[in-house]
Amino acid sequence: MKIKSKILIIAGSDSSGGAGIQADIKTATCLGSFAMTAITAVTVQNTKGVKSVVPIVPNEIYNQIIYTVKDIQPDAVKIGMLHSSQVINKVILSLKKIKTKKIILDPVMVAKGGAKLISDEAIKLMKKKLLKKVFLITPNIPEAEILTGVKINSKEDMIFAANKLIEAGAANILIKGGHLNSKKVHDIYVNKREIKIFNSKRIKTLNTHGTGCTLSTAITSFFSCGKDLKKSCELGIKYVNSAILTNPKFGKGNGPINHLNSIELNRNYK
């Protein structure tokens, strides 16, 4: 497989390998993108939960971004875990110096096991300043509820919350419907011009660790390669569903998904 694009990923590390930067790099690589990274925090975790979060100094996050981009210009940027207002301010400052407008934000707020990964002050700043600077935001339902104050119990609530985010300055929104109590999973893409509902079969499994990180990076990879945004969302959802369906059943808690589901081993390595 030839490398099709270059993406910069700004996110936290997951020591268990299922989410965060580790999932991002696997996803980008498996979909043909070259992944560069700026690590925002180091987490100590496994499939059962997060033990601790060690933040990286905000100025060093800024330096990672700027020094990398000075050498290799990314075709797109994916932003994940931003745990403090100081980090968000530094990321916003760095984005002003990156030429690409293809910026996708996954507003990581709570780990799969329930641990909070961002401060309340940072959430307010994200909504006030960062939403306006990205091309797509990909919250799950709990994250969309936090960002909008809307209680989501239906597809209609998801669309209403998405429109609230548009009012706050977001250009495009993909609200992920995995937390909704429904037979199918409804992921809803909304902007000022259209609403598109992606319907997927619900796969019954506990092994969904890292699906949010994986989806946003998959979308970034497809988008960076020249696909339009809606098609990138569609293909990203298909990739994640296949990764869930073929999960390796690792760990004793919420296990990882199979990022390698898109890879066929070259005959030279068999």
Image (spheres, rainbow, N blue to C red):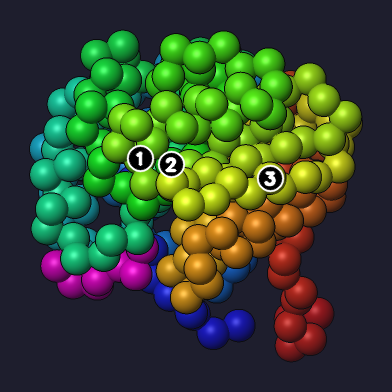
- Kindly identify which residue carries mark 1: 170
- Kindly identify which residue carries mark 3: 197
- Residue in the foreground of this view, choosing between 177 and 154: 154
Residue ID at (77%, 45%): 199
Residue ID at (38%, 36%): 166
Residue found at the far front of this picture: 193
Residues at marks 2 and 1 touching, judged by CB atoms closer than 8 Å: yes
Q: Position of residue 248 (x, y in %)?
A: 81, 44
**Looking at the picture, which amino acid does disc 2 mark?**
Ile
Q: Does the segment drawn in magenta span residue 71? A: yes
Label 2: state its secondary structure. Answer: strand
Magenta residues, start to end: 70-76
Q: Does the segment drawn in magenta span residue 73? A: yes
Question: Image quarter for residue 83?
Answer: top left
Quadrant holding the C terminus: bottom right
Distance of mark 3 from mark 2, alpha carbons? Answer: 16 Å
Neighbours of disc 3 within 10 Å: few (<14), some (14-19), many (20+): some
Distance of mark 2 from mark 1, alpha carbons? Answer: 7 Å
Q: Earlier in the sequence, mark 3 or mark 2?
A: 2
- Residue in the foreground of this view, choosing between 141 and 9: 141
Residue ID at (26%, 65%): 100
**Looking at the picture, which amino acid does disc 1 mark?**
Ala
Q: Is residue 178 above or below residue 136?
A: above
Q: Is residue 171 above or below residue 218?
A: above
